[in-house]
Image: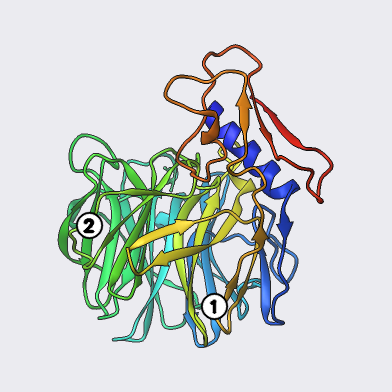
Amino acid sequence: MGNRKVVWFLVFALTFTLFGLHPERTSAASVTITNGTDWLDTAGNPIHANSGNILQVGSTYYLYGEHAVGGKFDSVNVYTSTDLKNWTFSNAILTKDSATELASSKIERPKVIYNALNNQYVLWAHYENGTDYNLGRVAVATSNTPNGKFTYEGSFRPMNYESRDMTVFVDTDGTGYLVTASRKNGGANDTMAIFKMNASYTGIQSFEGWLFENAYREAPAVVKKGNRYYLFTSQAAGWYPNQGAYATATSMTGPWTALTPYGNPSAFGSQIHDIATITGSNTTSYIYMGDRWNPMNLGEHKHIWLPLTLNDSNGTASLEWYTTWNIDAATGVVTPPALVNHAQGKTATASSTASGSSVSNVNDGNYQTSWVASSNSWPAWWQVDFGAPKDDHRNRHVLVYV
Ligand code: GAL
């Protein structure tokens, strides 16, 4: 981690966690989503559903995701819930025994979509052999129910283009799309590609164009609000968290805007895998679903779910960090905690400041600015004066050493 990220993380953790968490009271049906902890299913077992998606069928939510053991595909699991917090293991819908080529493989970013034309559920995922990332294929499987055993239909490169991190999206007119990290020029994942699916969503109908040329974007996730499409991506950084960015368009086939960063420079220690749309009786809310991988131990994965704000007026998206927040799946109402950032805008001092940066960058409320010490000499420190004692802590200063 670079100094900037350490500073951001420490200041954020100190300011928000120690000094100002006041969760609001919420209605009975509202549940608390807690980030960065080990999530268990209703039987008390870890929820093994990484990099997947949520599908709503009636009042039931289906959470899909992959489970790898020892770096190889074990299963795509599905869990069910009516409140988005209490998840019951339902089935392993695809396993390493479902097909010969899955016995020693990688299945990443599984997404299940519903095809209203033939009443089928279709699973798409990134497929690789068990040893490297050179195949660059998608895998497809189908089922008549959202949680049945899916029938494996095989793997392929969409129209012979490489395909790695990917997502699928069903538009309001029923058209299915594949958005994927592909290769246009020299490098694996250098440019994203967008394809239209065939009517059964089991194959590709047409190549629709390139996106973000040579930007090396990964982990695509699409959501539509009103007439606007938002496409969220991560950088290509292996399992390490990095700066997320999004683009918008009024058609899936573009033109797409340039990329705008969201969240903080580590996407709050996560990599996006989907945006869930929760349509309640009062409102529709959007949940940012991220994976917090541990690159040293992939088994230690954590789910990071945050309320995502999509602003209709100017087409911007914004993401804030909350350790805990509430959602009522029935009404769709999200209740973030009432946080007080006691440090924001207060007088800050530091051991030194590199030219081009500023001590106030740390507590200016802008995640994209940061303070850098002028030399590598150790220790460097940054301090803020709250101006007055706060009733939730005895000290007047936060001192951060980096
Ligand atoms: C990441 C990608 C993940 C996974 C990983 C393997 O860049 O987003 O989905 O493929 O690389 O190292």
Q: Position of residue 319 (x, y in %)?
A: 49, 56
Q: In x, y percent, where is residue 50?
A: 53, 57
Q: Secondary structure at mark 1?
A: strand
- Outermost right residue: 394
Residue 332 position (above or below residue 402): below
Q: Residues within 10 Å of mark 2 (few under 14, many from 20)?
A: some
Q: Is residue 176 visible to the viewer in this orientation of the structure?
A: yes
Left or right, 36 with reference to 208: right
Q: Closer to the camera, 230 or 50? A: 230
Q: Which quadrant of the frame does ligand 1 lie within?
A: top left
- Which quadrant of the figure has residue 227? bottom left
* Residue plotted at (21% across, 43% down): 213
Q: Amino acid at mark 1?
A: Tyr
For disc 2, the marked residue is: 256
Q: Residue at x 75, y 47 (%)?
A: 18
**The C terminus: image quadrant:** top right
Picture mark count: 2
For image coordinates 76% across by 42% down, the residue present is 388
The quarter of the image holding the N terminus is top right
Horizontal side of 312 relative to 294 (left or right) equals: left
Expressed as whole percent of the image width and height from the top left, the position of residue 257 reads 24, 54
Q: Which mark is residue 353?
A: none
Can see residue 202? no
For residue 121, which quarter of the picture?
A: bottom left
| Amino acid on which disc 2 is placed | Trp
- Mark 2 / mark 1, whichever is N-terminal: 1
Q: Is residue 267 above or below residue 9?
A: below
Q: Nearer the viewer, residue 20 or 246?
A: 20
In percent of width and height, residue 395 lies at: 81, 38
The residue that disc 1 covers is 61
